[in-house]
Image (cartoon, rainbow, N blue to C red):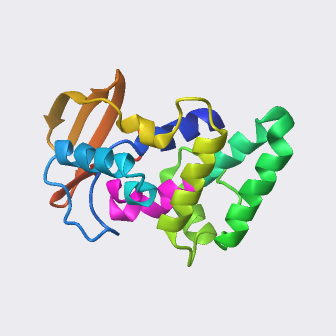
């Protein structure tokens, strides 16, 4: 999988809502996940969007977005140096350790292990917010995470512990973990 597709998966993954750091109970339905995400996006509460993911996946999601931001910085042409410097400052200010990504970026266990090492002791919600804002600033027009919540959730289908629907024609996937629904951080 190429790095931009990987980043796209991570950013797409951040397109619905549920509980955790904000102290709310897990969402009871996929619709509630999306509504929470839409409310957080409308209020510009970017760090609340991390709560949309299952608690055990949040550090990995943050790491995936960090890897994607690195690819984005390298692809900025004339802006690349300033972009890389800004990203380096974000990573330094959040005490992110330099840990190389696994050779197989689709191996979620290896990604989780690398994430745990790189983000040990890091406030994931604060780093997540900084990285999403970085992506919003340097990403392609319309790539802003908060824009993923503009529109309505349609064609929702629930199949056991999985659910999917569309927002503005793009697929969004949810997963039930325990008693709550969350945004799935991987494409099913």
* Residue 108 position in % (x across, y down): 49, 52
Can you see residue 46? yes
Residue at 72% in and 69% down? 92
Residue at 82% in and 48% down? 82
- Give the left or right position of residue 109, taking residue 176 as reference: right
Residue at 22% in and 41% down? 162
- Give the left or right position of residue 156, taking residue 186 as reference: left
Quadrant occupied by the C terminus = top left
- Give the left or right position of residue 170, taking residue 8 as reference: left
* Residue 144 position in % (x across, y down): 51, 39
Mark count = 0
Quadrant occupied by the N terminus = top right
Comparing 77 with 161, the one in front is: 77
The quadrant where residue 180 appears: bottom left
Residue at 77% in and 47% down? 83
State the extent of the magenta-drawn residues as a range.
50-64
* Residue 71 position in % (x across, y down): 70, 42
Q: Main secondary structure of the magenta part?
A: helix
């Amino acid at each position: 999988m190429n790095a931009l597709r990987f980043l796209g998966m991570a950013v797409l993954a951040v397109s619905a809502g549920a509980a955790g750091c904000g102290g709310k109970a897990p969402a009871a339905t996929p619709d509630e996940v999306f509504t929470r995400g839409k409310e957080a996006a409308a209020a510009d509460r970017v760090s609340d969007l991390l709560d949309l993911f299952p608690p055990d996946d949040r550090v990995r999601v943050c790491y995936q977005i960090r890897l994607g931001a690195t690819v984005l910085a390298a692809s900025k042409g004339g802006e690349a140096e300033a972009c890389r410097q800004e990203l380096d400052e974000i990573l330094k200010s959040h005490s992110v350790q330099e840990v190389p990504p696994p050779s197989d970026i689709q191996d979620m266990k290896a990604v989780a292990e690398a994430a745990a090492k790189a983000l040990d002791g890091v406030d994931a919600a604060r780093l997540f917010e900084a990285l999403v804002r970085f992506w919003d600033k340097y990403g392609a027009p319309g790539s802003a995470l908060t824009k993923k919540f503009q529109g309505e959730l349609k064609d929702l289908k629930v199949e056991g512990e999985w659910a999917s629907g569309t927002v503005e024609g793009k697929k969004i996937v949810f997963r039930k973990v325990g008693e709550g629904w969350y945004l799935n951080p991987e494409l099913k």
